[in-house]
Image: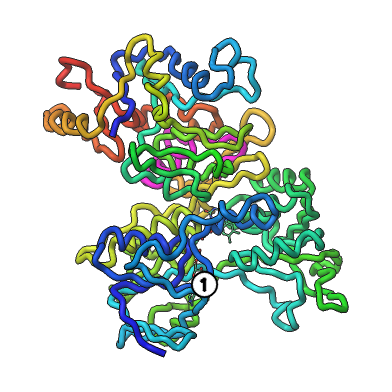
Amino acid sequence: MDVIAVHVDRCVGCKTCELACAVERGSEGKTLLSAVREAPQPQTRVRVEGAGGVSFAIQCRHCADAPCLDACLTGALARDAATGLVRVNDDRCIGCWTCVMFCPYGVIFPWPERKLALKCDRCMHMESSACVDSCPTSALEIVNVDKLADAMAEKRRSAAMAASGIAADGAVLLDLAK
Amino acid sequence: MGTANYDLVVVGGGAAGLNAAFSCRERFPEKRVLLVDRESEIGYYRTLLPMFMAGNLTEDKLFFWKPGDDENLDTRLGVQVRTLDRTAKSLTLDSGETIGYARLILACGGHPVVPPVFERAVTPEGVFPVRGLSVAREIKDWLPDHRDIVVLGGGLVGSKTSVFLRLAGFGVTLVEKESHILPTVLSADTARPLQRHLENMGVQVKTSTTIDQFKADGNGAVTSVRLATGEWLPCGTFLVGIGSAPDLGFLQGAGLVEDGELIVSPTLQTVDPEIFGVGDAIYIRVAGGDKHNPWTWPQAVNQGKLAGANAFVTSPVPLKRTTRVNAQNIAGVPIMILGGPGVGSSVEARPGPGDGVWREFFMHDGRIVGGALVGDIAGAGPLHFTMAGGEDVSEVADDLLVPRTRAFGASAWSSLGQARRATIIPAKGNDGC
Ligand SMILES: Cc1cc2nc3c(=O)[nH]c(=O)nc-3n(C[C@H](O)[C@H](O)[C@H](O)COP(=O)(O)OP(=O)(O)OC[C@H]3O[C@@H](n4cnc5c(N)ncnc54)[C@H](O)[C@@H]3O)c2cc1C
């Protein structure tokens, strides 16, 4: 499965990805100038998080055993058979926010004005992903999660990883601690 | 009538039972599975019934599954299980049929408790329990001509039902016997502003009281009910949304029920390891003796999946989480319920910026054991998993309590190891990472 991953060493926390996502995927006008005037205000599906001098963009991990899929009370959340990505069917979403509560990564966002749960679908129906395309430092990249997992497994054997005691759960992870 | 034999029989085709059947079929494709349900239709979202009754949802959106797609998954619908014989490993149905099983999953859910006042008399027309689709259809047809509604029970089902009916323009009075609504999951301080919110949207809320009499017209339809305070509430519709005690009568004499409760281990097995229990019907006894049942949809699905996967393995896997979390969107006010106050837990609460934004935690030994986020639910998911992981948060509780629009404040972010959340690509040539 292809997911969006982040180079932490390149992310400068500028939030350009948030803007690009909101404009491209959330707005009617599709330009920043018109998007800022829209009501309800377009929302992003990617968020830049961070503290202590580290920042990174985060969006849905499309977990293998996704808790949000079990949690959905209406059938709005479903895994796309072709791509393996988890997506929201807006038609069925009633904005009860149960999925928000069940996302361990905090990447399903309530959009109260539209009564919709908002999450990244990797721009699956577009040629490429808005956040990846817009990132000025190329910190975001689409990677094949299975290949990355292999690479990670290799890495994880290193003493440094063992010492940091990382446990991957649902997502492919690498420790930030140097 | 005849006898049939199955590898797995599931009693109850609700969220838990259906998912148990699906997961067993997926995990053990050669096994033949039978689902028995007393309702004639299954495979729908019970959680959507309040919206459906209120006329705000078309029926096609209710369903997620119809019988007949899988030749190794049989159903008996509209029939009730009458008895269980553990020695013969068989069930009898009220159709007269006997069903043999190798494994059994009990997923018979809960049922609203009918108030005593209606047990003493012929139940008038216009009185309905809120639970299943067939009754929800009757309610939907009944409501347009009987627009004044009394809802009994200020728990999750009753409150949610009141909200959706009020939003659809009906007159709604909600009656709760405790001193505040959502009494099992919220403290009075948190419930009060929510109650005000309900009142502002036009729901009349009557607390610390219940119904002790009713009146019916010449056609036998309810016209009003009396509160214990003596006040009469005119109503053409009376909805019962209290309690979800399972109907375990068919297990009588089978030795599975303890003090009226069906108790299972964390692997969802009853005292008979070939018989599993899931969903609203059960209590899970965890190490240390505590009993839990979350009685929520996500947990029912999750437990069903696990029981189905555990059915034919030699070492069944325990359930990961037994948190009783729940989300409600009460007419624009989001609330996240992390669980009710436990014995010996303390309350830590913090009002947020602006009206109607509030967080409270029930804490025990530095761990969050319950609480609620009201008005601003940012970061609720990670918080839920922090709680489920049993982490000591005494150092960061203050920070977690602050309502915010970003998922985490600085201290919580680093101390909770949130750096692990992204798929992070290692920097080139940086082996240590
Ligand atoms: C109106 C309403 C709104 C709700 N809203 C929410 C919500 O917003 N969020 C949330 O998390 N949860 C909500 N819930 C709770 C949630 O729906 C339940 O926790 C969940 O459905 C439990 O699933 P279950 O499979 O254990 O039981 P059920 O879904 O009740 O299924 C049990 C099935 O067993 C059958 N059965 C019982 N006894 C027998 C027998 N002897 N023989 C044959 N069949 C039998 C019944 O007919 C029934 O179909 C709501 C519930 C209701 C009623």
Give the SS element for disc 1: loop
Q: Is residue B79 left or right of residue B312?
A: right
> Residue B114 sits in which quadrant?
bottom right
Q: Quadrant of residue A10?
A: top left
In the picture provided, is B353 more to the left or to the right than A67?
Answer: right
Q: Residue at x 38, y 15 (%)?
A: A133
Quadrant of the image occupied by residue B172: bottom right
- Magenta residues span B372-397
Is B391 in the magenta?
yes
Q: How many marks?
A: 1
Estimate the x, y position of residue A23 in percent, counting from the top left.
52, 18
Pinpoint residue B50: horizontal percent, then vertical percent.
64, 56
- Looking at the image, residue A52 lies above or below residue B69: above
Residue at the image point whose x is 47% and y is 27% from the top: A45
The residue at the point 69 percent across, 53 percent down is B55
Is any part of residue B81 visible from this angle? Answer: yes
Ligand 1 has an atom within 8 Å of the beta carbon of the residue at disc 1:
yes
Q: Quadrant of the N terminus of chain B?
A: bottom left
Residue B287 visible in the snapshot: no
User: Which residue occupies the foreground of this view, B11 or B329?
Assistant: B11
Examine the rendered structure and indicate whether residue B411 appears above or below residue B137.
above
Task: Decide: few, some or many residues near mark 1? Use Cα within 10 Å; few <14, some 14-19, many ≥20.
Answer: some
| Spot occupied by residue B106 in the image (x, y as percentages of width and height) | 41, 72
Inspect the magenta stretch and tell me whether residue A104 lies in it.
no
Residue A71 or B415: which is nearer the viewer?
A: A71
Amino acid type assigned to the residue bearing label 1 in the image: Pro
Chain for mark 1? B
**Residue positioned 35% across, 34% down in the render:** A61
| Residue B338 screen position, x and y as percent | 50, 47
Q: Quadrant of the C terminus of chain B?
A: top left
* Residue topped by disc 1: B246
| B333 over A151 or under it: above or below | below
